Amino acid sequence: MTKSKSTGPRSRGNLRIGDHWNAITIIALSQSNPLKAVAELVENSIDARAKAIVITRGKEKGRHYLRVKDDGEGVRKNADGEPDFHYVATHVCDSIKRHLKAQGAGGLQGEFGIGLLSFWTLGEDLLLTSAGDDGRTWQMHLKKGDQRYSITQRPTLFAEAGTDVLIKGILPGIKNFSGEKIQWYLAAELRDRIRHSGVAIRVVDRTARAEFKVEPRQFEGRLLHELDGALPPQSEVYAELYLHAHSPANAVSLYRSGTRVLGNLTELDAFARMPWTSGYVQGIIDAPYLNLTPGTRLGVIQDATLARLADELAPLESRLAKIIEDQQRAEDERASRDVLRSVQGALKEALLALPAEEYDWFDLHRGEGKRRPRTTAHAESAEPLRADDQAAAIAAADNQEDSEGQRQFFEYAGPLFSVMISPTSSVIEVGGSRVLRAIARDRARRSVEHDLAYTWALLEGEGTLDHKGGEMATYWAAAEPGLTRVEVTVTQGDVACKAEAQITVAASLLPKAGSGNASYQGLPGYTFHKAAGELWRSRFDVERNLVVINNGHRDFVYAARSKMLKLRYICRLFAKELVLKNFIGIPPDQLLERLLELTLYTEENLR
């Protein structure tokens, strides 16, 4: 009886590969990205000090192929001066580059000795061609799924320098990889390797009959020179970062010695935080000491080298976060100005269309030591505007900026495009009158004033229209209540535009409760106050001339998801405050009617 060997705690041994061919198969199929396999073939050419590389995609005798041809040093030679294909085929996972790196050679990227095998993820056959010192050309043939290799002499008239890698029988899923797609991938994947080596790479797509030049990827935005000195002096890390407008597509890639290993740094848990997740920064972080995952060559091993990178980037992260914070603040201020300009413009258009005696501007004041708010032209008036003069005052507001200094070319109005009547809808008492004004505008909504002819007419209802062919007309109501429609036609040369106004003649009118006099009237600005959990949405602060908006309210949080939705929400808050100011003490149902009226005319002009 044979005794079995001890399996106690003292038993030791070395790991060995039980099935070498199975290991080679696993390695050959480990590359998940076929474009990465193409990039590795190009990197082999760059390591061979090639100055020109041509990648050709085409079809021959019904089979698709991909060729990578360079003018580099070719395959290493054996003692007879011939390409040492036997070494290449029998030293999988024992790259000569790893030995050269150990001896101090620089500028080499490969180290695993498995890059050539990744052709399994591209096609069926690989033909590797290189010339010897005697001028003869040799070729090695590898076939996917086959352990054997063959080396033959290839008859040529003249030997060509460099290496020719031809992959035939391109797999079905790879046939759709166009030359343009290969170009864009290599431009990002090998960005710094192309820049530092100066190699010229062309992609010839014979299938699409197009040719592309691979240029190192150019980032968008402003290069952050403020980050100089943020890395430790002894650090080998290279950072090239650009501040760009916020976009989810903005990302910082991780490189090792000029080759991209991660498209987005935030794929690593150590960097899944601000500022890398902000969406404001794009660029590269290059750390030559990182250890790559050998199988796919995508990603890094999360060992001490990654922890070292995180420590070295900590000062840079702090400085970058401050820059992004300043950028966000500037964008918020700019967005607030744009929102206020849109809301004020929409309200101004709405008040043009609504009866002047029913809607007044906000009552504002000039507090001592406070800057006078720049809202509309009504803020310049020391007295509240009379109802009959409001339309004229609004017209003056349109032209206020033109009167200050010389107009620029683009500030002059173009040809007639549209017309409106102010007010578009109004209610008057029987026997009363209403002054109507036609406002002509060009395509950019600038006021048109020259070479215009006006024609007024009553389309429906009773009453009389007093006009003298100008932009103003006076409607005199009949003695009975009713509904009247007035039309104006404005012509400029061959262009004619029409607009209508509706006048309701009522037996009697309810007096409007006002809020008293103020130093001047206009539209205020707004500010935010975060009061999460409180029910109020907005308040008009009389002391500060501001509409205070609760940006902690759930409705504001919901609206802030979309720029246009947020703009409409703020506009409705302004309309609510304006209605509350103009209609104090009226029943709730009438208050809601007024709110619907004002928001209808306001949102029509919101942009």
Image (spheres, rainbow, N blue to C red):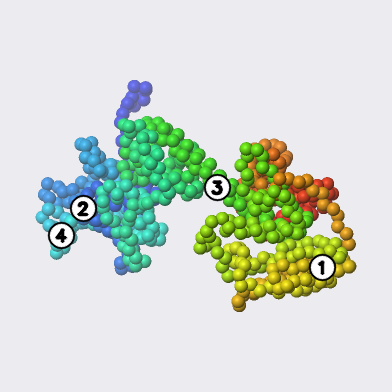
Q: In this view, does 137 lie to the left or right of 606?
A: left
- Expressed as whole percent of the image width and height from the top left, the position of residue 129 reads 21, 56
Amino acid type of disc 4?
Answer: Ala
Q: Do the residues labelled 2 and 3 touch (CB within 8 Å)?
A: no
The residue lying at 82 percent from left, 62 percent from top is 428
Is the C terminus in the top left, top right, bottom left or bottom right quadrant? Answer: bottom right
Q: In this view, does 549 lie to the left or right of 49?
A: right
The residue closer to the viewer here, 154 or 201, is: 201
Q: Reading the chain from its start, which is encountered first: label 3 or label 1?
A: 3
Q: Name the residue under label 1.
A: 476
Q: Is residue 421 left or right of residue 237?
A: right
Numbered circle sitting on residue 334: 3
How many tags in the picture?
4
Mark 1, mark 4: which one is toward the viewer? 1
Q: Reading the chain from its start, which is encountered first: label 3 or label 4?
A: 4
Name above or below for residue 497 compared with residue 39.
below
Q: Is mark 4 on a helix, strand or loop?
A: loop
The residue lying at 22 percent from left, 42 percent from top is 96
Residue 378 visible in the shown view:
yes
Q: Residues within 10 Å of mark 4 (few under 14, many from 20)?
A: some
Mark 3, mark 4: which one is toward the viewer? 3
Identify the image quadrant of residue 456: bottom right
Q: Reading the chain from its start, which is encountered first: label 2 or label 3?
A: 2
Q: How crowded is mark 1: few (under 14 residues within 10 Å), some or many (20 or more)?
A: some
Name above or below for residue 248 compared with residue 103.
below
Q: Is mark 1 on a helix, strand or loop?
A: strand
Numbered circle sitting on residue 72: 2
Q: Is residue 287 left or right of residue 81?
A: right
Amino acid type of disc 2?
Answer: Gly
